Amino acid sequence: MDAGSAVMSPEIVYLNGEFIAAAAAKISVFDRGFLFGDSVYEVIPYYRGVGFRLAEHLVRLRHSLEAIRIPADLDWPALLDELVARNGGGNLSVYLQVSRGSAGRRTQVYDGSLQPTVFACCTPIRDIYASGADSVQGYRVIVTADLRWHRCDIKATGLLPNILVLQQAKEAGADEALMIRDGLLTEGGSSNLFMVKNGVLYTPKLGSEILGGTTRDLVLTLAREAGIPYQETDLTYEQLLAADEVWISSSTRAVVPVLEVDGQPIADGQKGPLWRRMFELFTHLQHRLMTGE
């Protein structure tokens, strides 16, 4: 090995009380998360080794666990902090999944004797704002029926409907699918929805059929602090097409402008001024979190 080469450390994951190499992590084929999607998850960003909006993520995790009655109450901050540290700290995204566990056989019913399976791993976070607003590619989206169950507020791993609509979008040459149920827009296959009309920011109001994204909440917080008026309300397809701007948000993409819906341009088909303002707010926040400057 030459002097200039470096040895990559193996990725460390957490599984049921142990920090081990990812290649060594194994679960039972009878785990209910594997068989039935009987599990919940969170994706939590860590900047310079510190969990960002960790409390909010853990509140949502607790809500999901209680909603499907999985009794898992670990010291989550300590567990996740150590996992991040063992993977070198820095800027990482932590995936945490908790399943109901394994009964040693395939059966739909369960009792209170099951021990939950807890798994967590890390992936690097890249600075998606480093190149500036002009480098951000606007999205094309489609709108399709929301075929998910009626408890989308639970962040569960049963994501087949999301996978199907995202594949539908891909095959249509689009970047994301927005979903609609009973005439009202809900959210994207992997994002929350925003639109702008006459200087006001709108987003679908929360309920059991929408997952309250932490990035969605952050957008509203930044809007409030910047004096940008916003409303959480019902939104229709017609309002979407007539919007001045449309955005989507997610923890991995932050806030992205939507330039086209079902082949129709939004306004002039360009990135809007309010999105650029929100981009500046995000850029400032993310730069400070990732660099400390």
Image: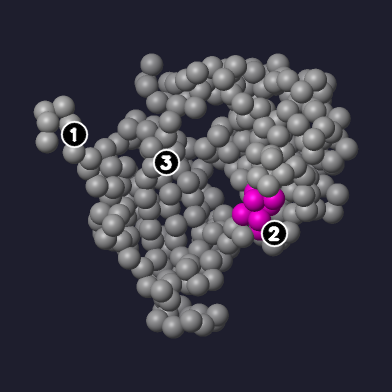
In the rendered view, does 154 fall on the left or right side of 125? Answer: right
Highlighted magenta segment, given as a residue range: 161-168
User: Is 14 colored magenta in this rendering?
Assistant: no
Viewer-closest of 285 and 226: 285
Kindly check if marks 1 and 2 are in contact, taking CB atoms under 8 A apart as contact: no
Q: Position of residue 88 (x, y in %)?
A: 26, 38
How much space separates mark 1 and mark 2, taking CA atoms? 46 Å
Q: Residues within 10 Å of mark 1 (few under 14, many from 20)?
A: few
Query: Which one is nearer the viewer's eye here, 156 or 170?
Result: 170
Asked if residue 164 is among those painted magenta in the image, a careful observer would answer yes
Residue at (45% x, 27% y) in the render? 127
Q: Viewer-proximal residue, 241 or 213? A: 241
Disc 2 residue type (three-letter): Arg
Look at discs 1 and 2 and give the one toward the viewer.
1
Q: Mark 3: which amino acid?
A: Ser
Q: Please report whichever mark, 3 or 1, sits nearer to the chain's N-terminal start.
A: 1
The residues bearing labels 2 and 3 have C-alpha atoms spaced at a distance of 26 Å
**Residue 268 vs residue 169: left or right?**
right
Q: Residues within 10 Å of mark 3 (few under 14, many from 20)?
A: many
241 w.r.t. 283: above or below: below
Under tag 2, what secondary structure?
loop
What amino acid is at disc 1? Ala
Residue behind mark 1: 6
Would you say residue 142 is visible in this rendering?
A: yes
Provide residue 262's location: percent of width, then percent of height.
Answer: 79, 39
Q: Are marks 3 and 1 in contact (CB under 8 Å)?
A: no
> What residue is shown with label 3?
93
| Numbered mark located on residue 186 in the image | none
The x and y percentages for residue 268 are: 80, 20
User: Where residue 7 sits: x, y (%)?
Assistant: 18, 38
